[in-house]
Image (spheres, coloured by chain):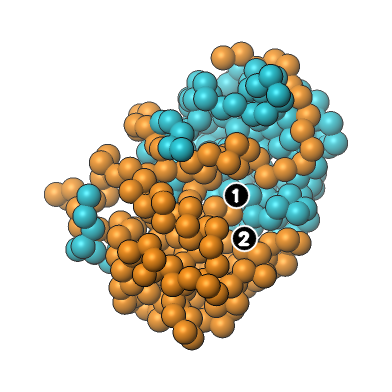
Chain colours: A cyan, B orange
Amino acid sequence: MQFDMKRILSPTTAVIPCPVILLSVAGQERPNIITVSWVANVCSRPPTVAVGIRPERHSHELISAAGEFVLNVPTAEQLEATVFCGTKSGRDHDKFEECNLTPLASSQINSPLIAECPINIECRVKETVNLGAHNLVIAEVLAVHIDEALLDSNGNPDLTHLHLFTYIPLTGEYWGLGKPLR
Amino acid sequence: MQFDMKRILSPTTAVIPCPVILLSVAGQERPNIITVSWVANVCSRPPTVAVGIRPERHSHELISAAGEFVLNVPTAEQLEATVFCGTKSGRDHDKFEECNLTPLASSQINSPLIAECPINIECRVKETVNLGAHNLVIAEVLAVHIDEALLDSNGNPDLTHLHLFTYIPLTGEYWGLGKPLR
């Protein structure tokens, strides 16, 4: 494909493709899950992540109170739960129960991880930066869980058979991953 | 796939899949390009991105001086350039020339965009947060360029034929995208 005629769009969030993460967090009444795509690894040492989240979201309140959360990597099998957890509020729904997802105890924090997600990242909040519509929550990674089924005989991750997917905000689509390029 | 036996890894950057972006920035001698994967959309209004970058990198110095940069979305056709720009230093290499990439004038800033990348995001730095090995550079999106070939007859983006790819830090692999899931 040749790209030589550009059109200028109004400023928008156009970094693609984006990760899709199920963020789980402890709550006074019950734990909650929120789907986030404004999320990234941002520092290698100490391993640090950042999550953009609207302050009016129920999970923002829970994260502020708990000071911690888990980032869970879903697979395409959880696409329906991913959409549900991104569009419904934990104020009105028990998302673990309604999505048939299982809370499991974390190793370092009180927020539960999601058993059905093959990779789970326990995080503790370090800093919150207000950016406008979203706050940026910066958090240190305390532990990573990976399913045994994803480790090869040497203990290295092999994700060949995992149905990962990604989000494209420009079109609002979820895309499955294809194959390794090299 | 059933996930029911977890193993705990030491803390690491495990958010996957990650975007892969060619960041271009003006320089006193020549503009430079650096490949970044610690990058995300983080706020919708104003549209804001964040990039994790090591302070000792040449591009960090250029970004600090310029106060701006362009995020360019590459396609699989630019995989070789992506690897080159992520492993060589702009102190020793003219990456535009050596990768056969064409600098084009931006609309709002002095840093050039990369003509061969179908999507280009002009950004102005707002704030830098030191996180440890990486600094987090937070920047507002000023303009987005998209190639005409990616717009349908209604002017909406149609990325069906674009060979996007993503990075998996857990394995160090680049994966091509597959198809929209819904």
Chain letter of the residue beneath label 2 in the structure image: B
Spatial separation of the CA atoms under disc 1 and disc 2: 9 Å
Q: Position of residue B126 (x, y in %)?
A: 57, 74
Position of A168 compared to B3: left or right?
A: left
Q: Position of residue A43 (x, y in %)?
A: 68, 55
Q: Nearer the viewer, residue A26 or A19?
A: A19
Question: Quick check: marks 1 and 2 in contact, CB under 8 Å?
Answer: yes
Q: Quadrant of residue A34?
A: top right
Task: Please say if B121 is above or below B154.
Answer: below
Question: What residue type is disc 2 on?
Answer: Gly
Q: Quick one: label 2, few (<14), some, or many (20+) residues within 10 Å?
A: many
Residue farthest along the bottom direction in this orientation: B28
Say which of marks 1 and 2 sits in front.
Answer: 2
| Residue denoted by label 1 | A40
Give the residue at x 46% y 67%: B33
Give the structural element (helix, strand or loop) at label 2. strand
Q: Quadrant of residue B171?
A: top right
Same-chain check, marks 1 and 2: no
Give the residue at x 67% y 70%: B56
Position of A16 compared to B156: left or right?
A: right
Position of B74 compared to B83: left or right?
A: left
Give the residue at x 47% y 57%: B84
| Residue denoted by label 2 | B52
Question: What residue type is disc 1 on?
Answer: Ala
Task: Please say if A35 is above or below A95.
Answer: below
Chain letter of the residue beneath label 1 in the structure image: A
Residue A23 visible (yes or no):
no
Task: Please say if A46 is above or below A31.
Answer: below
> How many numbered circles are shown?
2
Give the structural element (helix, strand or loop) at label 1. strand
Q: Nearer the viewer, residue B92 or B16?
A: B92
Q: Position of residue B118 (x, y in %)?
A: 30, 56
